[in-house]
């Protein structure tokens, strides 16, 4: 089922590793930004009038950093303009140190029913070196405040000087409340252009092999705690997979609003500008804010489908593949399948990457996308 994504590009400060469309010191533009966001929604509503949405996701940036009236306004606009299933999954990303009881009341009225909290690590020194705005204690406070909700927590691995004990402590803290039904576990990437990239140019980050070992440890430790991996970076208790993200990996349709937001509708992928001023200028002038657009069809569509599905622990459902494309997966990807046979397995009606190779999937996927 299709999803709605809303990008909130404001943050209190910039984390050293961050290359997302997020801007500290721009909070003064929030009023104008959200006015444009509501207008962009209205502009897209006519073409989406026959679509029923199953999930809504507020990502960022730090959506909990802005006045909650804007989130409430966005939800009101969505329910006015779009058809949304009554029990839709509605997620808001929050960061510790930016969430209060007053804000929570507004989120509740707005219909938010799932929160994704950024912990990253339980080590205060590492949090400081990443320029995260919060401490371990502030995460504990946020978790306490949100403990009655359906929660997901972000944990990061591959940090400088990180030990297995550090990761164990982070996972223990992340899973310390019963409301935490989902964990996202990402390896730190030192992206070109970020302060982190410049600082660690000399290779002070753990090696790929060291990160792979920590990842394997985390997968096993999360499993012991009842969180099963269903995608390379995502783990959940039974029945709590993220519907919004599953839709991406199933190559489902979604519409994104706001700066840097991507969409996939009717076989077309398109992305908005990452610049707030340019976005506001376009929308105020009754234009779309797209800076990229492409129609994905034929072999490219098949490659995309396979690449996304193989990220998940379920892999490719052969019947669904045939229903979608009218051809057989084994014929369309004969060479890639033969080359990667040792890494693949058939489970029931599905072809998947064997569990032990899921983390190194990129070296396998490359053969499927040509
Ligand atoms: S909180 Fe998230 S979006 Fe904001 S600067 Fe840090 S990593 Fe980037």
Image: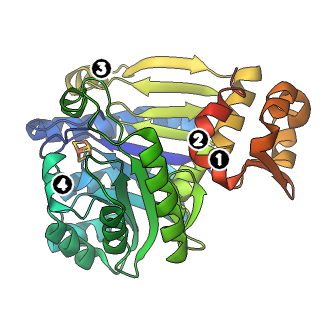
Which residue is rendered at x = 84% and y = 25% of the image?
Answer: 335
Residue bearing the label numbered 2: 360
Compared to residue 4, the image places residue 190 above or below, namely above
Label at residue 282: 3
Q: Could you tell me how far apart the alpha carbons at marks 3 and 2 are, in whole angstroms?
A: 41 Å
Compared to residue 27, the image places residue 198 above or below, namely above
Question: How would you rate the neighbour count of disc 4 (Cα within 10 Å): few for under 14, some for 14-19, many for 20 or more?
Answer: some
Q: Would you say the residues marked 4 and 3 are in contact, meaning their CB atoms lie under 8 Å apart?
A: no
Q: In the structure shown, which secondary structural element does the residue marked by tag 1 occupy? A: helix
Which residue is rendered at x = 30% and y = 63% of the image?
Answer: 166
Q: Could you tell me how far apart the alpha carbons at marks 4 and 1 are, in whole angstroms?
A: 30 Å
Q: Which of the two discs, 4 and 1, labels the residue nearer the N terminus?
A: 4
The x, y position of residue 2, in whole percent, is 59, 47
Residue bearing the label numbered 1: 357
Q: Nearer the viewer, residue 344 or 118?
A: 344
Q: Could you tell me how far apart the alpha carbons at marks 4 and 3 are, in whole angstroms?
A: 37 Å
Q: Would you say the residues marked 1 and 2 are in contact, meaning their CB atoms lie under 8 Å apart?
A: yes
The x, y position of residue 138, in whole percent, is 15, 68
Is ligand 1 closer than 8 angstroms to the Cβ of mark 2? no
Q: Looking at the image, is mark 3 or mark 1 nearer the viewer?
A: 1
Q: Could you tell me how far apart the alpha carbons at marks 1 and 2 are, in whole angstroms?
A: 5 Å
Instruction: Report ligand 1 position as a quadrant.
Output: top left
Q: Which of the two discs, 3 and 2, labels the residue nearer the N terminus?
A: 3
Question: How would you rate the neighbour count of disc 3 (Cα within 10 Å): few for under 14, some for 14-19, many for 20 or more?
Answer: some
Compared to residue 272, the image places residue 305 above or below, namely below
Question: How would you rate the neighbour count of disc 2 (Cα within 10 Å): few for under 14, some for 14-19, many for 20 or more?
Answer: few
Q: Which of the two discs, 4 and 2, labels the residue nearer the N terminus?
A: 4
Residue bearing the label numbered 4: 127
């Amino acid at each position: 089922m299709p999803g709605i994504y809303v990008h909130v590009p404001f943050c209190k400060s910039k984390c050293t590793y961050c290359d997302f469309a997020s801007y500290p010191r721009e909070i003064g533009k929030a009023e104008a930004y959200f006015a444009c966001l509501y207008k962009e929604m209205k502009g897209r509503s006519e073409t989406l009038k026959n679509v029923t949405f199953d999930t809504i996701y507020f990502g960022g940036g730090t959506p909990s950093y802005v006045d909650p009236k804007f989130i409430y306004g966005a939800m009101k606009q969505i329910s006015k303009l779009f058809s949304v299933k009554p029990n839709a999954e509605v997620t808001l990303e929050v960061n510790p140190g930016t969430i209060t009881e007053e804000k929570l009341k507004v989120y509740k009225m707005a219909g938010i029913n799932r929160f994704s909290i950024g912990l990253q690590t339980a080590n205060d020194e590492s949090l400081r070196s990443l320029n995260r705005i919060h401490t371990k204690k502030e995460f504990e406070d946020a978790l306490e405040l949100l403990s009655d909700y359906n929660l997901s927590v972000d944990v990061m691995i591959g940090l400088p000087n990180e030990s297995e004990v550090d990761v164990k402590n982070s996972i223990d803290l992340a899973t310390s409340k019963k409301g935490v039904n989902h964990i996202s576990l990402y390896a730190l990437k030192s992206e070109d252009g970020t302060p982190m990239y410049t600082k660690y140019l000399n290779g002070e980050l753990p090696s790929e092999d060291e990160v792979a070992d920590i990842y394997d440890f985390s997968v096993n430790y999360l499993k012991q705690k009842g969180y099963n991996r269903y995608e390379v970076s995502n783990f959940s208790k039974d029945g709590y997979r993220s519907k919004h993200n599953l839709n991406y990996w199933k190559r489902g349709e979604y519409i994104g609003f706001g700066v840097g937001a991507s969409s996939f509708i009717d076989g077309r992928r398109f992305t908005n500008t990452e610049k707030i001023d340019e976005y506001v200028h376009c929308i105020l002038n009754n234009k779309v804010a797209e800076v990229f657009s492409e129609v994905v069809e034929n072999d490219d569509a098949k490659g995309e489908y396979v690449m996304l599905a193989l990220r998940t622990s379920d892999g490719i459902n052969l019947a669904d593949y045939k229903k979608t494309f009218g051809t057989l997966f084994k014929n369309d990807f004969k060479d890639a399948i033969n080359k990667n046979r040792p890494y693949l397995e058939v489970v029931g009606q599905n072809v998947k990457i064997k569990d032990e190779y899921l983390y190194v999937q990129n070296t396998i996927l490359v053969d499927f996308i040509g």
